[in-house]
Amino acid sequence: MLLKKQGDFMSPNNLVSNIDEVLKSKENILLITFDDGLKEQFDLALPILNELNIPVIFFANSLNFEDKKVSTVHKIHLLRSIISTTEFLDKILKIEKVDFSDLEKVKAKEIYRYDDENSAVLKYILNFKLNFKQQEGIIKNMFDLHFEESSVLESLYMSEENLKEIAKLGYLGSHTHSHYPLGLLNTEKIKFELENTKTFFERLTGSKLDLVSYPYGTPETCTDEVAEMAKKVGYKLGFTTNRGINTATSNHLLLNRFDCNDLLGGKNYKEKL
C-alpha cells in the first residue's frame, strides 16, 4: 500500500490519547477515515484494512438508524445517477427561484473541486442556497418517484450489527444526525445534531464516541461555534475537509484532512508537485 511508505498508522483511540504528542511530532502519523457509514465500506474496505493491520474510523449518521431514513445527500446521489445534471437543475429552478452570482459560481467550483462546473453549481444550490425545508421537499418528491426508501436503507448503509462490530474495534465515529451543514444552523440545532448522534450510537453499541467528522467540512460549515459545541457535548477530536497537515497549533476540534484524490496515487496528486 502506497501510504504505508509515507508514515505510521495510528488507531483512533491512540490518536485521542496522544493527540498533543502526535501534533508536535515531526513524523507522519496517519489515520484513514470514511464518512457516511456505507455498507460497501464495511464489506469491501474493512476486510482489506484488517488484513493489512491498518486501523480506520467510520463516521456514520444516526438518522439512517434511529429514524430509518435515507440521508437527503444520498437521495441526491441516487437521483443524479439516473437524471442528468442539466435536467436536475431545471427541475429545481422550476420549483424554486434561486439567485446565483458569478462570485458564488467561483465559490462552488472551489468547494466542489472534483466536479465539472454544472455539477458544482447544482451541489452549491442544493447545499447552500436552499433552506432545508425547500431542499428536502424537492428531493423527497423526486426520490419517491424512483426509489423505495426501505430497500435503499438496507442496501446502502451498514447494519446495526455492523456498527456494533466496528464500535468494539474503536472504529466508529459521528457524522452528526442528519448530515446537515452545521455552520448554517442555529445553536440549538447544532447541539442536537452533534449530541443526538453521540448519545444514540453510544447507547446502541455500548461504546464511547470521541471523534466527529463534520458534514461537508468547509469553513462555512465548520465554524468556531460548531467546534465549541462539539467539545461541549463531549467530542475529543473533530475533522473538517480542509486540506493540510495538522500541527501543534491545530484546534483539536477543527483538524484538517486530505481527500484520497490529493494523496499519493490519487488523481490530483500530480497537481501538487
Image (spheres, rainbow, N blue to C red):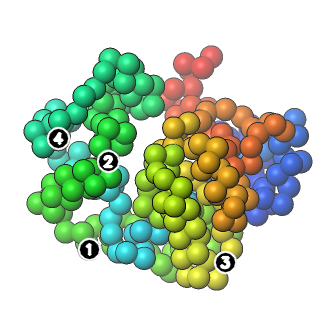
- Dot 1 and dot 2 residues touching (CB under 8 Å): no
Look at mark 1 in the image and give the residue it sits on.
150
Q: Which badge, 3 or 4, comes first in the chain's sequence? A: 4
User: Which of labels 4 and 1 is toward the front?
Assistant: 4
Residue at point 54% right, 55% down?
187
Q: Earlier in the sequence, mark 1 or mark 3?
A: 1
Query: How far apart, in angstroms, are the residues tagged by discs 3 and 4?
Result: 43 Å
Q: Quadrant of residue 89?
A: top left
Residue wearing tag 3: 207
Q: How many marks?
A: 4
Closer to us: 199 or 38: 199
In this view, 272 is above or below 78: above
Q: Nearer the viewer, mark 1 or mark 2?
A: 2
Q: Secondary structure at mark 4?
A: loop
Identify the residue at image location x=42%, y=61%: 178
Q: Dot 3 lies on which element? A: loop
Tell me the quarter of the image containing the C terminus: top right
Of circles 3 and 4, the one toward us is: 4
The residue carrying pointer 4 sits among few (fewer than 14), some (14 to 19) or many (20 or more) residues within 10 Å by Cα, namely few
